[in-house]
Image (tube, rainbow, N blue to C red):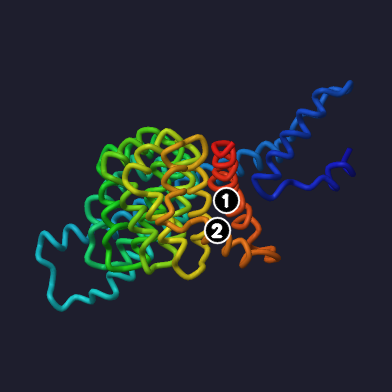
């Protein structure tokens, strides 16, 4: 028995604690009664669990400290501040606070605690429209981190007016990074979230995506097209709205720009607008667009390029749906 105790190693982390619990449970199921836990092991287990809880509390304290740094902005503004204060240093401090919060809020419990502490209201009310672009995009990034797969936080952010501000930043902010991060936050609020989609529609979100795809910012173009494709796949009932606003014509015009990753998502979106939707099909067949020749030429360019296989698949699929069927229809009419 003493030899067994000398060779037994106590776990050093939470994974070890879980393993210890599993082993204890397995032993309890065996024919022999489990060995009573020694006082030494009981003490270690209590300390390990205490440390675990303390670690969680420490993270809450870290978030409170970060929010205290971010709240100084409002209090200094109310006092007027000192003209000679070191603005750059203070911006760096706030940026660091945002980065720490984003990292902490990858943990869903921390994200929920941040909401309880008022951190999300602070982001929306003071930092999405901050004069410093580095603080605007970090606020948008934090909102995105918290909103991912968290319906409770999504509803909260929608209720405090985050979405229209994020759409405005996506649409017109002079800083390209702010626009991309804001669109990311928009995506986290509207994908697989019906309330978010309805708010998106009420604020003309599809027009924001259309303009985003026409931007000179390649990341914004690509992410706008990707979100459009995702929404079309999840909500085919929106085809009528998109075709009515001229989305087919706009997407084809994007295809005529120099080749880039955005084209794959644009072709995918056109496939969605054509499939089982006669008006979208008619728009694509409009001779004025010249889409048939454009697709034929694009297919030739993509042949043999393994990295472009998905784009080629969309391209060929669109050709078949729009023009192979049209030829069959015309042949049938001639007969």
In this image, 71 relative to 197: left or right? left
The numbered dot on residue 295 is 2
In this image, 87 relative to 241: left or right? left
In this image, 324 relative to 203: left or right? right
Number of numbered tags placed on the structure image: 2
**Residue 59 visible to an observer of this rendering:** no
Quadrant of the snapshot with the N terminus: top right
The numbered dot on residue 310 is none
Q: Which residue is drawn at 57% across and 63% down?
A: 298
- Element type at marker 1? helix
The image shows residue 45 at horizontal and vertical percentages of 65, 39
Marked residue nearer the N-terminal end (2 or 1): 2
Nearer to the camera, 315 or 194: 315
The image shows residue 217 at horizontal and vertical percentages of 39, 67
Q: Residue at x 38, y 53 (%)?
A: 249
Nearer to the camera, 194 or 257: 257
- Element type at marker 2? helix
Q: How crowded is mark 1: few (under 14 residues within 10 Å), some or many (20 or more)?
A: many
Give the CA separation, mark 2 to mark 1: 7 Å
Quadrant of the snapshot with the C terminus: top right
The image shows residue 328 at horizontal and vertical percentages of 60, 41
Q: Are marks 2 and 1 in contact (CB under 8 Å)?
A: yes
In this image, 145 relative to 175: left or right? right
Q: How crowded is mark 2: few (under 14 residues within 10 Å), some or many (20 or more)?
A: some
The numbered dot on residue 319 is 1
Q: Which residue is drawn at 52% across and 53% down?
A: 267
On screen, residue 27 above or below 164:
above
**Residue 183 visible to an observer of this rendering:** yes
Q: Which residue is drawn at 85% across and 47% down?
A: 7
Extreme residue toward the bottom, this view:
84
Extreme residue toward the front, this view:
335
């Amino acid at each position: 028995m003493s030899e067994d105790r000398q060779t037994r190693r106590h776990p050093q982390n939470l994974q070890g604690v879980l393993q210890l619990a599993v082993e204890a449970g397995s032993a309890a199921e065996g024919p022999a009664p489990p060995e009573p836990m020694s006082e030494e092991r009981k003490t270690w287990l209590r300390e390990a669990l205490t440390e675990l809880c303390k670690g969680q509390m420490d993270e809450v304290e870290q978030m409170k400290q970060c929010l205290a740094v971010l709240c100084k902005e409002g209090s200094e503004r109310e006092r007027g501040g000192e003209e000679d204060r070191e603005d750059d240093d203070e911006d760096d401090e706030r940026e660091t606070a945002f980065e720490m919060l984003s990292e902490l809020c990858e943990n869903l419990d921390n994200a929920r605690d941040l909401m309880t502490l008022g951190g999300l209201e602070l982001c929306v009310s003071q930092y999405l429209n901050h004069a410093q672009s580095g603080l605007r995009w970090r606020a948008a990034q934090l909102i995105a981190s918290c909103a991912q797969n968290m319906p409770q936080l999504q509803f909260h952010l929608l209720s405090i007016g985050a979405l229209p501000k994020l759409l405005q930043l996506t649409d017109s902010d002079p800083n390209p990074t702010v626009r991309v991060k804001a669109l990311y936050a928009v995506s986290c609020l509207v994908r697989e979230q019906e309330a978010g989609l309805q708010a998106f529609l009420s604020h003309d979100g599809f027009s924001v995506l259309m303009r985003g795809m026409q931007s000179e910012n390649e990341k914004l173009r690509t992410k706008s097209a990707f979100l459009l494709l995702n929404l079309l796949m999840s909500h085919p009932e929106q085809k009528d709205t998109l075709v009515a606003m001229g989305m087919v014509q706009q997407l084809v015009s994007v295809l005529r720009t120099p080749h880039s990753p955005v084209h794959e998502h644009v072709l995918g979106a056109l496939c969605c607008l054509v499939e089982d939707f006669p008006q979208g099909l008619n728009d694509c067949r409009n001779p004025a667009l010249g889409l048939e020749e454009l697709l034929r030429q694009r297919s030739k360019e993509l042949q043999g390029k393994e990295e472009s296989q998905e784009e080629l698949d969309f391209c060929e699929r669109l050709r078949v749906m729009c023009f192979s069927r049209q030829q069959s229809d015309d042949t049938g009419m001639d007969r």
